[in-house]
Each structure stands twice: as C-alpha cells, then as structure tokens.
C-alpha cells in the first residue's frame, strides 16, 4: 500500500489526541508539560507532511517547524521555571493543589 | 517501514501519558520524540529530523528529567487521576479523534506544486535568512527575541522568593501572638 | 485711541498681585504683602484714571454721543461657528465710572488695611483675597458680554465669601460667610436662567448686540415678546430673573438677609465689598441693561423701582434701632442701594427723561465715597474701642479728632446736607421720582429723613453722648487714634465726600450716552433738606447727651421698635420656611423616597447580582483541567458547527 498524506495525518491526529488525553487526565504538572510537547510534535508532523506532499516547491512548512521547535523550547523553559517556583511555594506540583485562582 | 515507525511513535506516546512512574513517562516521551524524528527521516527531511533530535531529545526532555529530579521522588508512583475525569476525557478525545479523522479521510488533497527544492542545510539556511520571496528573516529575528525574553523570564520567575506557606505561617503566628 | 494694554492691565495687575501673594505670600512676603498689593493697585488706579480721562475728554465721544467701545475682544469658548463665548472689555460711561470707583476705593482700603490688619496672622492671605476681589470686580464692570459678567459675578461672590469668613475661627463669621454665599448663590440661579432666556431669544450674549436687538424692532424682539409664560412675556421674565440676581448681590428685599451678617468680616472689607463696590453690582447690572428695561419692558423697571423703594424705607427703619455700629451701616447701605434702584425704576430713556438713570449712577458714585468713609471710620473706632456696640462708645471726639471730623463729613453727606456730595445726588433722585411717580417720591423723602436720623444717632452715640472711659486693661494699647496709614484714606475719602457732588454728572453719564446739563432745581431741594435737618435735630435732642429720651421713645412705639430691632423677623421667617416648611414637606418625603425606593431599587439589583453570582460561581473552580475540558469540548463543538452546519 502506498503511504500517502492521509497516513501521516492519521499519525499526527492520533498523537495530538493522545497529548490532549494526557493533558486532561494527568495531575502532575511535569507530565502535563510532556503532553503539551506531544501536541506540539503532532503539529510539526502536520507542517512537514503538508510541505512534503502539497507544497513541495517551497520550504515554508520547514521554517514553521523550525520556529515551532524554538518556541517549544522557550515554552518548556518558562513552564519549568513556573513549575519549580510553584513547587517552592506549595511543596507540590499537583495541579489540584494550585487552585487559588477561583471565586 | 513507515507503519513500523508510526506504531512505535504512537505506542510510546500512549505509554508516556498513562505510565504511573514519572521518570518512566519521561523516558517514553523521549522514545516518542525519537519516533517523530524517524518519521522526518523517512520523509527525507534530514535537517528537521536532526533538529528534532537535538532540541527535543537532547534539550527539552533532558530539561524535563532535570526538573523531575528537582521536584519529585523518582521511584514513587504518581497519584491516580480521578476516574470520572479519565472516562469523560477518554470519551471526548475518542469522539473528537473519530470526528477529525473522518474529516481528513473525506477531504481530497490536491498537490499544488511538485517537489523541486534540494533539501540541504545550505538551501534551508540561505532561504531562511533571505529578504525576498519566501525568506523568513523577520520571523527569525522575532523568534530570537522571544528566546531572549524567555530566558530573562525564567530567571525572574525562578528567583528565590519567600514561599507562600511560610508567609501564611508567619501571619498566623503574628495574629496568635 | 486707547492703549489696549493699559486697559487690560487695570484688572490684570490685581490678578498678578493675587497670584503672587496667594502662591508665595506666606513664605516670601509675610511682611511686605501689604505693600505689594497696594502698589499693584496704585498702578491700576493710575491707569484707570488715565483711561477715564481719555474716554471722557479725548476719544469716547463721537458726534456728541458716548460710544460703547469694545476695545478688547477674543473668542474664549467656541462651540460652533454661530455660538461662542467671548471675552472682552467694554468701555462706556458707566463702566469707566465704575473702574474709577472700584480702583480708588480699593486703593483706599488697601492703604487703610496696612494699619488695620497689621500683625494679623494671615496678613498676606488677606491681601491676596483683597486683590482677587478687586480683579473680579474690575472684570465684572468691564465685561463685554452677559456670560462674562456672570463668571466675574460668581468670582466676586467667592471672594466676598472668603473675606467675610476671614476670621474663620469665629463660628459667627463662618455662619455669616456661608449665609452670604448661599443666599447670593440662590439669587444667581435666577440670574443664570435670565441670561439663558434672554440670550437664547436674542441669539447673542454680547451686550451691545443684545441691547440693540432687544430695543429696536427686530425678529428677536418680536419672538421674545410673543413667547409668553404664566401671563408675562419671556422678556419680562428674563429681565426680572436677571434683576433677582442683582437683588441678591445688592441685598434688596427679600434677599437682603446676608448683608448685615456679612459685617463679621474685617471693617475694611465691609467698606470695600459690602458698601462701595460689590453690593452695587446689582445696580450696575440693571443700569447695564437699562435700555432694554426702559424701552422694551417698563413693567420690569417698575418692579425694580418698587422693590428699591420698599427696601430703602424698610432698611432705614431697621437701621434706627440697631446697636451694632456696623450693622447700622449695613442697613444704611441697603437703604441707599434701594435708593439707587428706585432711581432706576422711575427713570425713562433718553435726555431729560433719563434723569433717574443719571441720578442713580451719581448716587452710586457719591455713595461709594461716603459709605466707604463711614465704614473705614467705624473700623477706626472699633480698632480703638475693641467693640462693635454703641453702648461701649461715646465721647470719642476728643480722642479721635481726625476720625471724628471725617465721620461727621460722611454723615452730613449721607444725610443730604448741602453742599456735601450726598445732597446733590439725592436731590436728583428725588426730583426724578417727583416727576414720574409721586408715591415713590414720598417713600424716598421719608427714607431721607430716617437716614439723617439714624446716621446722626450713630454719630452722636459714638462721638458725644457721654464721657469716654477707658477700662484699665486696654489703657496701654491706646497710644493714639490710629496709625497714619489709616488716617490718610479717611482724609482722602473725606475730601471726595465733599467734592464729589460738584461733578456735573449729566455731562458724562446718561441713559442714552448723550450729554445733557442737569440743572439744579432749588425748589425741589427744600423738602429733602428740611426733612434731613429735622432728622438731625431729632437725633440731636435724643442722643446728644445722656438722657432717657431714647428709652421713652422706644417705649412709646414699642411694637414697631421691637419688630424693627428684630429686623422685622425676616430671618425668622426664612428659618421657618427652610426648617419647617422645606424640611418637613420636601426634605422628609424625599429622604423617605431616597431610603426606601431609590435605595431599595439599588439593593434589589445588588441582591439579584449576588444570588446569580452565587449560583454560577462554581464554574470558576480554579481547576485548570476542568477549564481545559470545557475549552476542548467547545472547540470540537465549533469545528462541528463550522464543518457541518454552516457549509
């Protein structure tokens, strides 16, 4: 069977929803962060796949992927800084404990 | 070959979000990232695959592992998620996945232009930094600013502060005395 | 032509003085504040004299008519091309006369205060307020449009408020300043409505245009007369409302109640504000709009005349019974202003008919001089005796010769004894009244007699009657009569009180701007002089020396005496109206409505909000993953909507 765009999109969609599932069910903030990384990766796969199969004459998808990776790195760094700070103040990184921002 | 890589990626990703021990979850994530890099290799996007491995596998996952060491007792199992939420999320996610995939399945993709560009690090670099046509110099600069801002932000956030609990205790003490 | 800079400097110099003293006075000019204020005013006085000379003798007159010259004019607020509020300087005979009066009297008061207020804690503040008042008063008289006059009108109100309440640690002074402000403010409401009515119908705020449009047959005049409300035309209403504003400032009945209480301020302030300048603003206002009154709406002018006449007699009666010397003078001021209003009321427009107008302005001029003199003299007496009450005085003529002499001059002037200034102006008023309205003439004549009586009652009580005994505590303070800074203004004003009557006023000020020689009518002056002398004689008999005649007289007319002593219970009526009627009939119901209906509505909406938010606040749980699920479901729902429903 010829592997086409649809297959790749299946992979990326599955990866995306695995990430969403993790984000919704995990209680530990670091694992939630990992789920977010999965989501970002699925988006990257999408970009690359579209670039490969539909817009082969240019490199736009590649650049977007590169920027996304850079942004993901920045985001991870900031998120981890926040998590560590939260750990210092609450002695816990359970998302259920960080619910001060309510009514 | 593709099916092998895809299955590897998805299975490790699934393990990563369901594993009870956090350190193992991070390792599964690492494998999943490798799997994604494998997909890029399979697509002949070597440069992107290399970047993926360097940044994700070598950078972000390692960073996550460090933070796990900083905040967690590694061997201990994590608290279980609430059952109600798991079932509800699973339902929502499965439905959404099916929904999205049906849309994708039904959609007819048309090829806009044939692949013509030689995908070496050289072309990527030149086009990324060019000013004309599909050049991306401005976003490139913006992203560099973003990285700088993120760095400064991390330092500011992580600066030592008095923990809230200590403050609360002091307050209680002062009101008691 | 005129030097516009000079004219602008007349009001601006006091303003500069005010800003300088008000901002930096306490720190830098603590001792020199008086001299700064006085010098700036001296310059201002000189400039206004130059302006007056130029206006009256050089360039004011064109073809035998004194022109209304708008020497400075600029748009201040421009709402639309057709509607703007201008600021300007209007020169005409009465405004030029007024700037001379204001600057001269103010200068006298400034000099006088150098001695009177010496050693006062808030010396520089006092001079700052004086400068502010002078500035606003000059601005008022020079205003070229009716809105500008309103602005300065309120400014003089404020500075009067500040100066009455100058001794703000005295509760009575605070109450008096509040009373003055509220009563005049209440009257100013009428003024404002009048301004809006008139300017709306005349479609201009400018005095020149307003008078022109409302005195000649124009569409504006037609519309003003044609529109009627409650049986009177809008023109009548507008003019009457404006007169109410003037009556408030000029202490006409029944808005006079603030003026006697305003005597709580320092004596020089009373001389400046509550005798010579501010209180005649109402007269000035009516005179300013006089052509409109006289030509288009004689009814309103009659009202002015009647109220003026009534106030004159009413206040004169009260003045006969008061014992506080400054209050006597306050009622006398009210009575004399009533005289001026009366004169305006009986006047016609143009030439011989305009005798009343000329007489009114003439009396305003002479009255400013001798009344300021009286107040300053009273101030000197109070300065010496440390009391306002007549019973603490008597026999002061040996101790205060200069004050005695000048006070006597002023008393003779106000009593209308020839050849002092009051005689001439009063005679003109009386002959004007005689020509047009006999009833008012007799009221004025009676007032003249009462005036002579109470002024000499005051004079004899202060300077004769009994030997002055100093109580031993204050003996050390009495080194002399008064410092020279206080005597010089007394003497200067005394000279003016003698000479001012010889000015041929008709040549300069007349209702239509055309000079006419006012001839002196000997026959007309017999009656007032006789009745004035009779009043003086009566006062001589009763108050010259210590006896019990005054007691017997007051016993004889007991009811009248008591009610006059209590100011005919006007204050009590006001208190009754405000406290009982207004408070019970309006205040309480509206308080009830406010508490139960208005507050109830507010509380109801607050309670509703509270309940609703209590119901829905659970959504804001603070749990991130809950939010994420909702977000996720929402996104899926929207995708579904876009793909299947909207395609």
Image (cartoon, coloured by chain):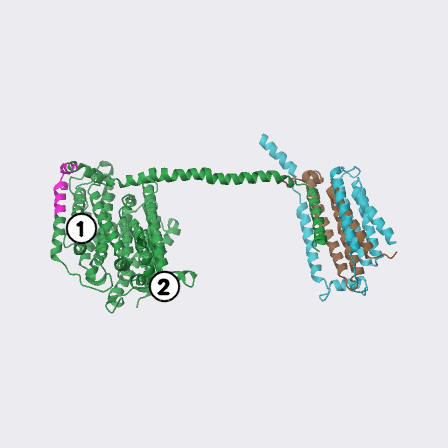
Chain colours: A brown, B cyan, C green
Single out the mark in the foreground, 1 or 2: 1
Dominant secondary-structure state across the stretch colored magenta: helix
| Residue A98 location (% of width, % of height) | 68, 40
What chain does mark 1 sit on?
C
Q: Which mark is residue C73?
A: 2
Residue at 61%, 38% in the rendered image: C615
**Residue C539 among magenta residues:** yes
* Towards the viewer: A69 or C398: A69
Is C564 located above or below residue C348 in the figure? above
Q: Residue C286 occupies which quadrant of the picture?
A: bottom left
Residue C88, can we see it? yes
Badge 1 crowding class, 10 Å Cα cut-off, few under 14, some 14 to 19, many 20 or more, is few
What chain does mark 2 sit on?
C
Tell me the SS state at disc 1. helix
Q: Is residue C25 left or right of residue C287?
A: right
**Residue C49 among magenta residues:** no
Q: Which mark is residue C439?
A: 1
Judged from this view, the residue extending furthest toward the bottom is C63
Q: How many numbered badges does the structure rendering display?
A: 2
The span picked out in magenta is C534-554
| Residue A13 location (% of width, % of height) | 78, 51
Q: Which mark is residue C351?
A: none
Residue at 34%, 39% in the rendered image: C581
Is C19 located above or below residue C71 in the figure? above
Residue A45, can we see it? no
* Towards the viewer: C65 or A75: C65
Q: Is residue C131 left or right of residue C372?
A: right
């Amino acid at each position: 069977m010829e592997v086409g765009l649809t297959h790749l999109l299946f992979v990326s969609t599955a990866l995306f929803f695995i990430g969403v599932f993790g984000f919704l069910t995990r209680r530990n903030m670091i694992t939630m962060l990992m789920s977010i990384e999965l989501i970002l990766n699925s988006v990257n796969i999408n970009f690359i796949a579209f670039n490969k199969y539909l817009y082969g004459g240019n490199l736009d998808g590649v650049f977007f992927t590169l920027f996304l990776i850079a942004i993901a790195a920045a985001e991870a760094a900031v998120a981890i800084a926040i998590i560590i700070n939260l750990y210092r103040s609450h002695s816990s990184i359970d998302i259920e404990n960080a619910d001060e921002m309510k009514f | 070959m593709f099916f092998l890589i895809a299955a590897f990626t998805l299975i490790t990703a699934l393990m990563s979000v369901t594993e009870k021990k956090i350190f193992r979850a991070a390792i599964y994530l690492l494998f999943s990232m490798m799997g994604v890099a494998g997909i890029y290799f399979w697509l002949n996007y070597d440069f992107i695959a290399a970047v993926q491995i360097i940044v994700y596998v070598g950078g972000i996952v390692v960073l996550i592992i460090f933070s796990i060491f900083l905040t967690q007792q590694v061997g201990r199992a994590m608290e279980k998620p609430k059952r109600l939420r798991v079932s509800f999320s699973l339902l929502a996610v499965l439905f959404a996945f099916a929904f999205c995939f049906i849309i994708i399945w039904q959609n007819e993709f048309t090829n806009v232009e044939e692949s013509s560009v030689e995908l070496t690090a050289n072309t990527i670099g030149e086009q990324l930094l060019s000013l004309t046509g599909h050049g991306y110099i401005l976003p490139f600069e913006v992203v560099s600013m973003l990285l700088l801002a993120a760095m400064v932000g991390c330092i500011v956030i992580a600066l030592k502060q008095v923990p809230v609990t200590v403050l609360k205790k002091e307050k209680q003490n002062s009101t008691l005395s | 032509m005129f030097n516009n800079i000079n004219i602008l400097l007349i009001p601006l110099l006091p303003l500069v003085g005010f800003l300088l003293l008000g901002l930096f006075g306490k720190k830098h000019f603590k001792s020199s504040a008086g001299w700064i204020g006085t010098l700036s005013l001296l310059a201002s006085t000189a400039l206004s004299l130059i302006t007056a000379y130029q206006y009256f003798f050089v360039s004011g007159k064109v073809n035998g008519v004194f022109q209304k010259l708008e020497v400075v004019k600029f748009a201040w607020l421009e709402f639309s091309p057709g509607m703007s509020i201008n600021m300007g300087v209007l020169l005409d005979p009465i405004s030029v006369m007024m700037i001379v009066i204001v600057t001269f009297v103010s200068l006298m008061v400034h000099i006088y205060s150098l001695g009177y207020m010496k050693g006062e804690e808030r010396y520089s503040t006092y001079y700052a307020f004086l400068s502010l008042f002078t500035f606003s008063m000059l601005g008022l008289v020079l205003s070229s449009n009716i809105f500008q006059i309103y602005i300065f009108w309120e400014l003089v109100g404020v500075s009067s408020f500040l100066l009455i309440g100058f001794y703000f640690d005295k509760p009575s002074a605070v109450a008096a300043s509040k009373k003055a402000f509220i009563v005049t403010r209440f009257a100013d409401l009428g003024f404002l409505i009048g301004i809006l009515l008139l300017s709306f119908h005349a479609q201009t705020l400018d005095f020149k245009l307003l008078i022109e449009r409302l005195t000649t047959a124009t569409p504006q005049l037609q519309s003003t007369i044609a529109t009627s409300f409650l049986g009177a035309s809008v023109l009548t209403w507008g003019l009457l409302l404006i007169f109410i504003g003037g009556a408030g400032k000029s202490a006409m009945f029944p808005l006079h109640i603030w003026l006697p209480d305003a005597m709580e301020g320092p004596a020089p302030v009373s001389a400046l504000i509550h005798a010579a300048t501010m209180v005649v603003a109402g007269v000035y206002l009516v005179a300013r709009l006089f052509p409109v009154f006289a030509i288009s709406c004689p009814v309103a002018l009659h009202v002015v005349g009647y109220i003026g006449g009534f106030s004159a007699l009413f206040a004169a009666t009260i003045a006969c019974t008061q014992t506080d010397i400054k209050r006597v003078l306050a009622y006398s001021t009210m009575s004399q202003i009533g005289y001026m209003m009366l004169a305006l009321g009986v006047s016609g427009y143009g030439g011989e008919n305009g005798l009343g107008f000329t007489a009114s302005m003439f009396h305003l001029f002479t009255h400013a001089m001798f009344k300021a003199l009286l107040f300053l003299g009273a101030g000197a007496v109070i300065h010496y005796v440390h009391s306002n009450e007549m019973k603490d005085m008597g026999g002061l003529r040996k101790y205060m010769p200069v004050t005695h002499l000048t006070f006597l001059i002023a008393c003779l002037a106000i009593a209308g004894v020839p050849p002092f200034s009051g005689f001439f102006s009063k005679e003109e008023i009386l002959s004007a009244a005689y020509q047009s309205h006999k009833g008012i003439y007799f009221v004025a004549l009676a007032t003249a007699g009462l005036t002579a009586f109470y002024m000499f009652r005051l004079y004899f009580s202060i300077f004769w009657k009994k030997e002055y005994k100093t109580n031993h505590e204050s003996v050390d303070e009495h080194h002399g009569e008064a410092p020279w800074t206080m005597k010089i203004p007394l003497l200067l004003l005394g000279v003016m009180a003698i000479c001012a009557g010889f000015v041929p006023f008709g040549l300069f000020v007349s209702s239509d701007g055309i000079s006419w020689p006012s001839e002196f009518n000997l026959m007309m002056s017999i009656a007032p002089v006789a009745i004035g002398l009779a009043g003086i004689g009566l006062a001589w008999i009763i108050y010259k020396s210590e006896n019990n005649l005054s007691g017997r007289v007051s016993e004889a007319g007991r009811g009248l005496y008591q009610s006059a002593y209590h100011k005919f219970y006007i204050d009590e009526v006001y208190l009754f109206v405000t406290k009982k009627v207004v408070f019970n009939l309006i205040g309480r119901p509206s308080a009830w409505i406010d508490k139960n209906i208005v507050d109830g509505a507010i509380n109801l909406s607050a309670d509703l909000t509270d309940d609703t938010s209590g119901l829905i606040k659970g959504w804001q749980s603070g749990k991130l993953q809950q939010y994420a699920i909702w977000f996720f479901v929402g996104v899926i729902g929207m995708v579904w909507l876009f793909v299947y429903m909207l395609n």
